[in-house]
């Protein structure tokens, strides 16, 4: 099964990236990093190929394929982020999550592929999931920053600190991801209003309302960061609130529709 192969490729790459940041493996940093880059690249290529087949050759975009799509984004962003040496510890964490979510690949039992949708609806669905993937990365970065701040406050100094980027770098990364995620989420909402005949239909009202609320929360966070200099726990907790709302909009409403009501989210 290719899912198991992808899982172990991501997992080994994550371990290699993490080890490359530890002082006791400094003499093997180059080889560990090369191994991690190679394995994660192979994993992303295989993962992307399988997911493409699932989405456009009959599997369709269901709950499991949506999770797998987010996993692919996590793997890709981890791979790109690892080019910055200080972010390789974070990349290791992203790859671990990518490994777990990749197990959902190929588990869809839908009978209608995404390709059967109009290009307008297809673009809306994929934009929505791309936005959620970006903001998922942001949630991981936020938790990463929260742990890092807690360790610094309690002066927990150890070799594991090498896995953390400087807190200022982490906060800048979180702000950049929030900005990108907010932009793509806004495009998703606009495309939904434009291309879906009634975005407040009974089976879409919860998703639409919660998505708009999440967009508002992220907008307030960005405004607070820009005009009031919000940082630290206030910014992190507000981000996690917006992410939780968006997560329920995407997957809570989707689970209710598909598993309980037997209806298609698309």
Image: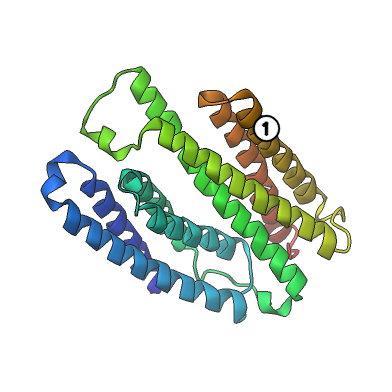
Q: Residue at label 1?
A: 223
Whether residue 87 can be seen here: yes
Q: Position of residue 204 (x, y in %)?
A: 80, 55
Q: Residues within 10 Å of mark 1 (few under 14, many from 20)?
A: few
Up-down relation of residue 263 to residue 209 (above or below)? below
Q: Residue at x 35, y 37 (%)?
A: 165
Whether residue 100 can be seen here: no
Up-down relation of residue 130 to residue 169 (above or below)? below
Q: Residue at x 65, y 64 (%)?
A: 126
Q: Of 229 and 196, which appears nearest the observer? A: 229
Q: Of 241 and 248, which appears nearest the observer? A: 241
Total residue callouts: 1
Residue occupying the far left of the picture = 27
Q: Residue at x 40, y 31 (%)?
A: 167
42 left or right, relative to 128: left
194 left or right, relative to 48: right
Q: Residue 228, located in which quarter of the rendered image? A: top right
**Looking at the figure, which quarter contains the N terminus?**
bottom left
Helix, strand or loop for disc 1: helix
79 left or right, relative to 34: right
Q: Residue 190, located in which quarter of the rendered image? A: bottom right
**Looking at the figure, which quarter contains the C terminus?**
bottom right
Q: Position of residue 135 (x, y in %)?
A: 57, 47
């Amino acid at each position: 099964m290719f899912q198991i192969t992808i899982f172990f490729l991501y997992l080994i790459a994550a371990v290699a990236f993490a080890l490359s940041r530890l002082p006791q493996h400094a003499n093997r940093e180059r080889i560990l990093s090369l191994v991690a880059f190679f394995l994660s690249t192979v994993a992303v290529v295989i993962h992307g190929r399988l997911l493409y087949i699932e989405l456009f050759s009959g599997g369709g975009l269901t709950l499991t394929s949506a999770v797998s799509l987010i996993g692919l984004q996590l793997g890709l962003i981890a791979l790109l982020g690892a080019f910055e040496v200080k972010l390789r510890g974070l990349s290791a964490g992203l790859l671990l999550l990518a490994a777990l979510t990749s197990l959902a690949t190929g588990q869809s039992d839908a009978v209608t592929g995404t390709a059967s949708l109009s290009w307008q609806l297809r673009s809306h669905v994929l934009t929505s999931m791309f936005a959620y993937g970006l903001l998922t990365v942001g949630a991981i970065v936020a938790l990463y920053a929260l742990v890092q701040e807690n360790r610094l406050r309690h002066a927990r100094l150890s070799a594991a600190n090498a896995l953390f980027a400087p807190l200022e770098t982490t906060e800048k990364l979180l702000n950049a991801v929030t900005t990108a995620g907010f932009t793509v989420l806004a495009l998703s909402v606009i495309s939904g209003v434009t291309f879906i005949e009634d975005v407040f239909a009974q089976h879409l009202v919860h998703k639409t309302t919660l998505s708009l609320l999440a967009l508002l929360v992220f907008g307030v966070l960005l405004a607070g960061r820009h005009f009031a200099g919000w940082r630290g726990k206030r910014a992190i907790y507000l981000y996690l609130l917006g992410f939780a709302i968006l997560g329920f909009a995407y997957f809570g409403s989707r689970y209710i529709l598909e598993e309980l009501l037997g209806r298609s989210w698309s």
